[in-house]
Amino acid sequence: MRAYIVLTTINVPHLLKEYGENLEKFGHKNEVGFIVIADLKTPAEAKSVCDELSAKGFEAIHMDVNSQKEWLKKFPELEKLIPYNSDNRRNIGFLVALEKGAEMIISIDDDNFVKPDEDWFAYHNIVGNTHEFEMVESSDGWFNVCTLLETIPNRTIYARGYPHSKRWKNTEIKRSRVSKKIVMNLGLWNETPDTDAVTQLQEPVKVIGDNSKKIILAKGTNSPINTQNTAVHRDVLPTYYYILMGFVINGNKIDRYGDIWSGYFAKKVIDHIGDAVAVGGPIVNHIRNPHNFLKDLREELAGMILTESLISILDTIQLTSKTYIESYRELGEKLQEVVKNHKEFDYETKEYFYHIVNGMKVWADVCEKIIRGS
């Protein structure tokens, strides 16, 4: 398979049948497979969706908890880093796709619905190839991808994970045409944008349109990269470990930043290697699952605070390694060194970053073993 769609869910993922119809309609049936990672709360009926897709000629893999346990026996250190009842379990799907030789892994959430009349896969299929697009370069190192969306009410919003210290700035954006190898593609969303709880509580926003023109983020120009409708080349996957959440920092449990921080780390390495991240299509309809935004706010607060320090730390780190996997290892080592000597971090924060760096190392080691064996 050229690519696998990966998701973890606690629901019956009926939406995958619509993806199957879209792939078949536009001639991608033999290029794209499905990997569904179940969790403790996932209904047994979830497997029936994969069975239906398989009956129609797709490769569709459903991994229940027991089959995941069996697969993880090969990597006991990794199993300790993948908790139940967590989005973090999609890491297993990523690795299974890598093991099966996928050139590209596409991560979606179970509330990201494909638009039936658009060739969804064609937008992601740029990953791994060189293309010419408009590149955006920001004077302060940050670009708000939500400016590509049209909303009601018409107001400025920022993607979940966008540092609050970088919002509402008079930022100069330079634009130029460049040809770059695209190794990651961030698709966007109609209906409900992926914004943080602060934005949702302030005033709900609906996306009603988009500027579908593809852009490239320049080296040193950052934006949150989530795991909703995002495609990653296999070379980059060793940098895309979904960071372990759930730790208590200064009385607040941190959550909802695992994908955001993994995106920041991946972008750091991609910039160093000299490849590029594209943003724009495909657009999915994000019919968001029910959320308690006050609960989200409580779990995002620690992430909001730590992100401010993390982005400053990443700016100070200079990478020298020549490959993605070695650069990611180097990033982890240098991150740990900075955190160890960080005067503003207390013991809890330093201990949490120790767990993050350990997870990065284990992830890189597992990816290397899989790549050598595939």
Image (cartoon, grey):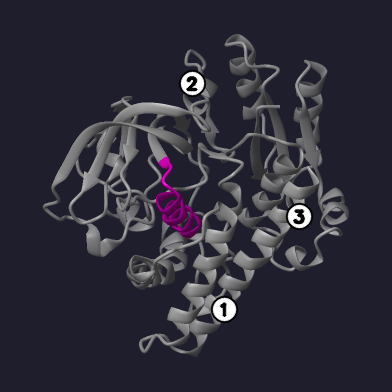
Residue type at mark 3: give it: Lys
Q: CA distance from mark 1 to mark 2?
A: 42 Å
Residue for badge 2: 115
Residue type at tag 2: Lys
What range of the chain is rendered magenta? 261-276
Viewer-nearest of discs 3 and 1: 3
Q: Nearer the viewer, residue 86 or 4?
A: 4
Residue 61 in the image, given as x and y percentages of width and height? 78, 35
- Report helix, strand or loop for mark 3: helix
The quarter of the picture where residue 8 lies is top right
Image depth: mark 3 or mark 2 in front = 3
| Labelled disc at residue 354 | 1
Residue holding disc 3: 369
Residue ID at (50%, 69%) = 254
Q: CA distance from mark 3 to mark 1?
A: 23 Å
> Label 1 amino acid?
Tyr
